[in-house]
Amino acid sequence: MKTKIALLLFAVAAVAGPAHADLNVFACEPEWGALAAELAGDTADIAVATTAQQDPHYIQARPGLIARVREADLVVCTGAQLEIGWLPLLLRRASNPKVNEGSEGHFAAADHVRKLDVPSTVSRAQGDIHPSGNPHIHLDPRNVRLISRALAERMAALDPANADLYAQRRKAFEERWAEAVGRWEERVEPLEGMRLISHHTAFRYLAEWAELEIVDHLEPKPGLPPTSGHLSGLLDRFRANPPVAVVRTPYSDPRPSQWLVERLAVPDAILPYTVGGAPGADDLFGLFEVTISRLEQLAK
């Protein structure tokens, strides 16, 4: 059967369970659903738990999601505690030992790349900080390549009958990806040093790869809503030397950004963040194409 990427927005849509396929994949975020589709082709049924309009830190463990995890052969998530607020409950209620954390059927993408911003100490005073480091790893295209290799190997281990196919599709994906990354690196080179304020730390890896400068965040601490005092402090700090723009994800509350950009007279820019986050960002390639295009527009 053709690969199906089911967005589980409503429980009733998923209660019936997945179609028969060689490999049933449950992806926590759209980027991993898209990568699984690149690697699996026609051999997998893929369900995605969240959309670009949802904060992946916070979703409900709805019955439809539980049903899909119960039938899954492979759960693919970011890890690094990005889903700590809902995935453990989902796994517990699904009662599917094949995909529990630590099993071969549980794949955490963050385990296969170097994390940024790993704290030396952790306390609640630091906000919603992740002990393993910043989990928004997919916005560095070099990480996507590393994760594609590890995920293809895991798929082959779970579905050895199709091991050659996963290897072939991984090779083809990596070749296309390498060619695209080469183009993207040329395009972001003139953007080096672009100064941005970001709502959340969601674009940390993008900034590291493209050598952008995120000068501050609307959140006073990660995960804590912007306060009037913090926003006023940003206004005072950057009034004389404003950033190029304030950037945010599609799911971020627009009001703090709009308050600040009106006073700094800079653009309020939404970057797609993940697959489906903007028109044209329909797969991983489109995600980076649209993201870079929007940054280029800001630089003009």
Image (tube, helix red, strand yellow):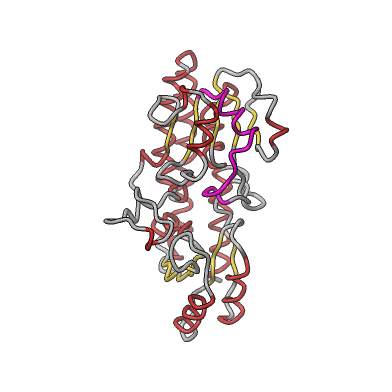
The x, y position of residue 156, in whole percent, is 44, 21
The x, y position of residue 202, in whole percent, is 48, 56
Q: Nearer the viewer, residue 90 or 46?
A: 90
Image quadrant for the C terminus? bottom right
- In the rendered structure, the answer to whether residue 235 lies left or right of residue 60 reads left
The x, y position of residue 129, in whole percent, is 40, 56
Residue appearing at x 55%, y 81% in the figure: 264
Q: Nearer the viewer, residue 54 or 166?
A: 54
Verify whether residue 59 appears in magenta.
Answer: yes
Image quadrant for the N terminus? top right
Is 296 placed above or below 59 here? Answer: below
**Quarter of the view holding residue 111:** top left
- In the rendered structure, the answer to whether residue 278 lies left or right of residue 197 reads right
**Quarter of the view holding residue 261:** bottom right
Please, which residue is most extreme toward the left here?
A: 120
Q: Which residues are magenta?
A: 55-73
The x, y position of residue 266, in whole percent, is 57, 76
**Quarter of the view holding residue 113:** top left
Residue appearing at x 55%, y 45% in the figure: 285
Please, which residue is most extreme toward the bottom here?
A: 240
Across the whole image, how many numbered discs are drawn on residues?
0
Verify whether residue 90 appears in magenta.
Answer: no
Is 115 placed above or below 64 here? Answer: below
Please, which residue is most extreme toward the top here?
A: 161
Residue appearing at x 28%, y 56% in the figure: 121
